[in-house]
């Protein structure tokens, strides 16, 4: 069966997350979005684990269910440690096939750091040692390096990472078969590194609020079970792992280089021209994902490996509506339009990618329909994100924005 999976989210017990990041709201929004499988996140936190145990039904295949939505046991671990006289900060996503295995993982990690302090615990634990612990506990566990290009907390991060995956995970490297690309990069950027060809590249929302689940996701056509999903990723089977759903990477918070306090946003070329220093204050720039990919790449832009899994760039529906109306995503008018569209056309993913254009044009505000079509075609303008600032998407140019009276009109 074909299904959409978002493996990486956080619970209400992680820092800076919505109080609505609970099982009920996650299942509700998964149905709105068109997601059939979602990661639990944060299984290392005792209160969240208790909630998961009490609300999820064991399906007997490594997955758990709540009101028709499947969950896979997952958690993110932040490792902060020194290696070869350099500090490293690496985030890894852990998947477990059962609560029994989760209990063993938590019992071991509790002896290393405080798991109750945050849904995503910070441990002074070498990433290679974390991998060894996880795989020794249960060979069916899976470790995926998270958002691998983010400057501050990732495998290849410019501020705290490594140049080679083997330098990070050492003898555990062969047991790792998937990497998370993160919001600021897409698969095409990762295809420039031949060293990554053997890995499945997955994309997830890393969401801190229910409304943002699925902003990146993975589409499979296999049995909806833990073993089948992991085998599809392990073998990089294109008939079973169909494609990923991606942010435009320019939307991500670290796509370009820059210095947020001085409002300096640079391409890699501009950064090099300024010797990676802010021209306003002289401090070092935060080197973003595009620059870091350039540093490590051994292939030109546009190269595509033979075994590459395809991807589709989408813009979340609330962003599209907000852009058309010239309003904030959180406004009531945007929410009403969003829910009205879904009530007529189905899930958000169906609206963004599958509903025929003629139906969109006939069934909703004409400018929203046009914006969805333009987004599908990549006809968008994005001021790239940098140094922690999300990129800004514009579908219509300033001269093409709706007038005040037009903003009031809606099909619904």
Image (tube, rainbow, N blue to C red):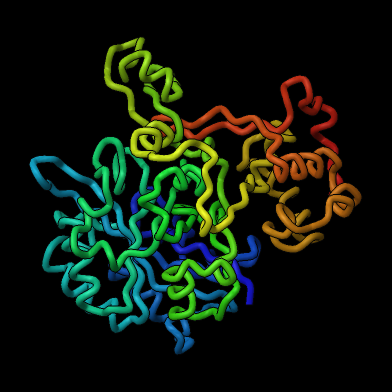
Q: Nearer the viewer, residue 282 or 287?
A: 287
- Residue 95 x, y percent position in the rendering: 36, 70
| Quarter of the picture holding the N terminus | bottom right
The answer to whether any part of residue 333 appears in the image is no
- Residue at the far top in the pictured view: 280
Side (left or right) of 335 relative to 135: right
Q: Is residue 283 above or below residue 233?
A: above
Side (left or right) of 122 relative to 235: left
- Residue 348 x, y percent position in the rendering: 68, 57
Q: Residue at x 75, y 44 (%)?
A: 372
Q: Nearer the viewer, residue 179 or 265?
A: 179
Res 272 → quadrant: top left
Q: Residue at x 38, y 40 (%)?
A: 298
- Residue 149 x, y percent position in the rendering: 37, 43
Q: Residue at x 54, y 53 (%)?
A: 216
- Residue at the far left in the pictured view: 85
Q: Nearer the viewer, residue 288 or 114?
A: 288
Res 170 → quadrant: bottom left
Instruction: Report the label total.
Output: 0
Side (left or right) of 372 relative to 188: right
Q: Is residue 110 above or below residue 267?
A: below
- Residue 307 x, y percent position in the rendering: 51, 59
The answer to whether any part of residue 323 appears in the image is yes
Q: Is residue 339 above or below residue 367?
A: below
- Residue at the far bottom in the pictured view: 60
Q: Residue at x 44, y 48 (%)?
A: 182
């Amino acid at each position: 069966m074909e299904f959409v999976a978002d493996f990486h989210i956080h619970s209400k017990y992680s820092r800076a997350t919505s109080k609505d990041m609970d099982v009920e709201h996650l299942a509700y929004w998964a149905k709105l979005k068109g997601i059939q499988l979602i990661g639990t996140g944060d299984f290392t936190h005792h209160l969240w684990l208790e909630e998961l145990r009490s609300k999820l039904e064991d399906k007997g295949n490594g997955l758990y269910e709540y009101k028709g939505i499947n969950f896979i046991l997952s958690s993110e671990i932040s490792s902060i440690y020194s290696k070869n006289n350099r500090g490293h900060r690496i985030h890894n996503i852990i998947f477990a096939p059962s609560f029994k295995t989760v209990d063993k993982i938590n019992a071991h990690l509790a002896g290393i750091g405080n798991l109750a302090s945050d849904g995503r615990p910070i441990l002074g634990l070498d990433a290679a040692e974390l991998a060894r612990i996880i795989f020794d506990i249960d060979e069916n566990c899976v470790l995926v390096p998270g958002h691998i290009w983010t400057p501050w907390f990732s495998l290849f991060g410019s501020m705290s990472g490594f140049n080679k995956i083997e330098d990070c995970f050492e003898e555990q490297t062969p047991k790792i078969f998937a990497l998370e690309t993160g919001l600021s990069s897409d698969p095409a950027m990762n295809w420039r590194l031949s060293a990554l060809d053997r890995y499945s590249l997955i994309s997830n929302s890393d969401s801190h609020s229910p409304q943002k689940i699925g902003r990146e996701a993975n589409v499979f056509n296999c049995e909806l079970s833990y073993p089948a999903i992991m085998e599809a990723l392990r073998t990089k089977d294109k008939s079973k792992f169909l494609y990923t759903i991606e942010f435009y990477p320019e939307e991500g918070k670290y796509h370009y280089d820059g210095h947020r306090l001085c409002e300096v946003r640079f391409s890699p070329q501009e950064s090099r021209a300024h010797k990676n220093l802010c021209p306003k204050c002289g401090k070092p720039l935060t080197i973003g994902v595009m620059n870091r990919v350039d540093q490590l790449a051994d292939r030109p832009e546009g190269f595509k490996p033979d075994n590459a899994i395809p991807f589709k760039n989408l813009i979340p529906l609330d962003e599209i509506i907000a852009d058309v109306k010239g309003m904030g995503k959180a406004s009531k008018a945007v929410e009403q339009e969003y829910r009205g569209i879904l009530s007529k056309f189905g899930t958000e993913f169906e609206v963004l990618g599958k509903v025929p254009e003629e139906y969109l044009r006939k069934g909703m505000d004409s400018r929203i329909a046009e914006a969805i079509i333009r987004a599908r075609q990549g006809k968008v303008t994005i001021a790239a994100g940098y140094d922690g600032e999300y990129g800004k998407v514009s579908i219509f140019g300033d001269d093409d924005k709706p007038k005040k009276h037009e903003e009031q009109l809606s099909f619904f």
